[in-house]
Amino acid sequence: MLRRNVLLFGLVGGFGFALAFVAALYAFGSPTANPAEHRVEESVPHRLRVAPDAELVRWFLFEDGERVGPVLSPMPAELVGLSSTELADGQPQWRLLSFSEGRVVVEEHCSQLTGGFLRSEHGALAVYEGDIDGCHRKKGTIELDGGLISPLQELELELGVPFSSGAELVLLLEGIAAP
């Protein structure tokens, strides 16, 4: 009798286990399906995107190993709304260091710089090599007498005045110093 009860209990338990397994497969899907595939599909609508008021923080890395930055600027309009993957794919010269909706931090590799620009900073005139909107590094500063610069020149120098050669730099400096 005991043997018969144990056998009956085993059959009922096995049937219950098989029924529960089939129900779980039906409810949750096949175990052979790629779980990563489901996670990606679920997370795409919630992927972080660059906000319109986001800040772009750039670090410039030069071939000689010098690292310059951070350079802070508003996010360019063409990059607003992109995800981190789209941003990385669209800007191959950048290495994404940090990404959030309100702040993107990148490192930009810079090769040989051409030209430069002048910018007014803290009552002095800073001389940069490179591009105002791209890779650049400070080469030196020139102290200025505040009375020599007109309000129009001051406004231009706050934004940055580009030059393409050493000769053009000399002409710009002479123009600033001229009465």
Image (cartoon, rainbow, N blue to C red):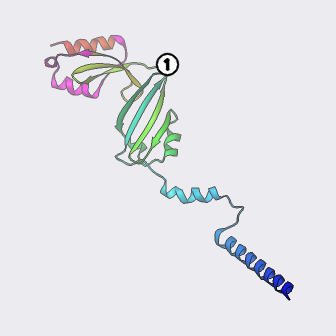
Measured as percent of width and height from the top left, residue 158 is found at: 25, 27
How packed is label 1: few (under 14 Cα within 10 Å), some, or many (20 or more)?
few
The structure residue drawn at horizontal position 21% and vertical position 28%, both measured from the top left corner, is 155
Name the residue that disc number 1 marks: 64
Where 118 sits versus 37, above or below?
above
The structure residue drawn at horizontal position 82% and vertical position 82%, both measured from the top left corner, is 6
Q: Which part of the image, by quadrant, shows the N terminus?
A: bottom right
Measured as percent of width and height from the top left, residue 9 is found at: 79, 83
Q: Is residue 67 visible?
A: yes
The structure residue drawn at horizontal position 50% and vertical position 58%, both measured from the top left corner, is 45
Q: Quadrant of residue 67?
A: top left
Which residue is at the front of the view, 142 or 153? 142
- Circle 1 — which element? loop
The structure residue drawn at horizontal position 84% and vertical position 82%, both measured from the top left corner, is 7
Q: Which residues are magenta?
A: 142-166
Measured as percent of width and height from the top left, residue 109 is found at: 49, 28
Q: Quadrant of residue 15?
A: bottom right
